[in-house]
Image (cartoon, grey):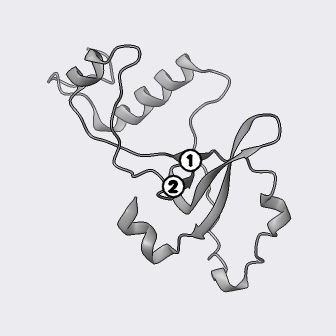
Amino acid sequence: MSENQTGNDAPDPGRAGDVAASAAEQRNPASPARPVGVAALEVPAPLGDMPAIRGSALDAVKVCLSVEVGRIDLPLREVRATKRGGVINLDRMIGEALDIRINGRLIARGEIVATEGQKYGIRVTEMVTDDRQDDED
């Protein structure tokens, strides 16, 4: 029997750490495992002390503005059965204000107008306030 072995087959608890360290060195001999110190984290400043983001910093952010003519919930089979020339009735009446959305969020309502170059435009007729937005999303 070697001097590190005892009469039973149980591993020597004193050698378990040595075996693990040796295995780690064999896997990555250039950087042996060792404890790392971590500096204490700083307590963040209250939000009131932080400078506000200037509006001009946000002006270049792109958003998707869309105009919604109307909606309808219907079974997929009806959508699949629609042929060219078919009409799908929507929930809005002619002349009713259309929803103006930014990134899907309702921000205003307006009416369709013709613009230069035979393109559609939308004239904003109403801004939607935050308290009304939740009811209509």
Q: Nearer the viewer, residue 122 or 101?
A: 122
Residue visible at 78% across and 77% down in the picture: 51
Whole-percent x, y for residue 136 in the image: 39, 63
The kind of residue tagged 1 is: Val
The kind of residue tagged 2 is: Asp
Q: Hey, which residue is sitting farthest bottom in the picture?
A: 48
Number of disc labels:
2
Rounded to the nearest angstrom, the CA distance separating label 2 from label 1 is 6 Å
Closer to the N terminus: mark 2 or mark 1?
1
Residue visible at 61% across and 58% down in the picture: 38
Task: Say if 120 sits above or below 83 in the image.
Answer: below
Judged left or right of residue 26, residue 9 is left
Quarter location, residue 42: bottom right
Q: Nearer the viewer, residue 118 or 47?
A: 118
Q: Hey, which residue is sitting farthest right in the picture?
A: 56
Give the residue pinned by disc 1.
67
CB atoms at circles 2 and 1 under 8 Å apart? yes
Mark 2: secondary structure:
strand
Residue visible at 28% across and 32% down in the picture: 12
Quarter location, residue 34: top right
Whole-percent x, y for residue 9 in the image: 16, 21
Give the residue pinned by disc 2.
99
Q: Quadrant of the N terminus?
A: top left
Residue visible at 34% across and 31% down in the picture: 88
Q: Quadrant of the C terminus?
A: bottom left
Task: Say if 58 sits above or below 26 in the image.
Answer: below
